[in-house]
Image (cartoon, helix red, strand yellow):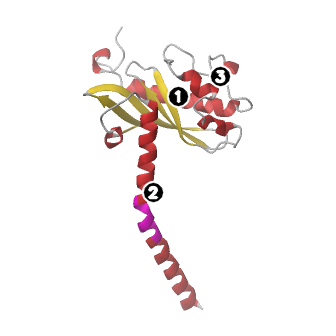
Amino acid sequence: MVLALGAVCLVCSALLGTVYAVTKAPIEASELQKVNAAIAAVTPAFDNVPSEAVQAVEGGEIYTATHGGQTVGYAIKVTTGGFGGPLTLMVGFTPDGTVYNTSVVSHAETPGLGAKLVDENVAPREQVKGKNPAVNKLSVRKDGGEIDAITASTITSRAFLKGVNDAYAVFQKNCRPAETLNSEGNEQE
């Protein structure tokens, strides 16, 4: 009985290892395609491949988009806690810190409610475009902010806006042009 059980476990392990080896490359290619699509959706037109030079920093990942050697935007990938679980966003900023666009990379929100966030025209996503978090209060109106929540999905809307603000914090810390920072890394007056 021990030999039979051992043989079954050995065969199952070999099958799992084979399936993993065969599917690893297509899964990685699919994930890279998803990231590249999100970057293209949240930044102005670019001529480089931002996903090739990803910068992993505390709080997220930064993808720099350039056109003709000039930085045209930054795509910042962050994860925050939503109502149903992790909510991963790609937030695009112009070099001056204005939100260019947002993309929902993955979520576990309730279908028909919080999952509406994947629609680019839903209130929170549409209303953050063109706003600069340094000037505008990007939080839901219930919390004294400027953004409408998704009806019956205030928690998801708050999580989304927290993600946008977290991405902006990453932007401020890592993407500011050197000439606007003093020696301590603070913005000059």
| Residue 93 figure quarter | top left
Image coordinates for residue 50, horizontal then vertical, percent? 34, 38
- Residue at (59, 32) in percent of width and height: 160
Viewer-closest of 128 and 5: 128
* Tag 3 and tag 1, C-beta contact below 8 Å: no
Q: Residue at x 36, y 41 (%)?
A: 51
**Label 2 CA crowd tier, 10 Å (few <14, some 14–19, many 20+):** few
Q: Which residue is mark 3?
A: 140
Nearer-N-terminus badge (3/1): 3
Q: Can you say whether 127 is above or below 91 in the image?
A: above
Crowd band around label 1 with a 10 angstrom C-alpha radius: few (<14), some (14–19), many (20+): many
Q: Quadrant of the C terminus?
A: top left
Identify which amino acid the numbered label 3 is placed on: Val
Residue topped by disc 2? 27
Q: Amino acid at mark 1?
A: Val
Residue at 70 percent across and 30 percent down: it is 154
SS category of the residue bearing label 3: loop
Which residues, given as a range, are shown in magenta?
Answer: 19-25
Instruction: Please say whether residue 24 is one of the residues in the magenta stretch.
Output: yes
Q: In which quadrant of the rendered view does residue 52 lie?
A: top left
| Residue visible at 29% across and 28% down in the picture | 67
Instruction: Give the dominant element type of the magenta stretch: helix, strand or loop.
Output: helix
Foreground mark, 2 or 1, reads 2
Q: Which residue is mark 1?
A: 164
Q: Describe the element under mark 1 as helix, strand or loop.
A: helix
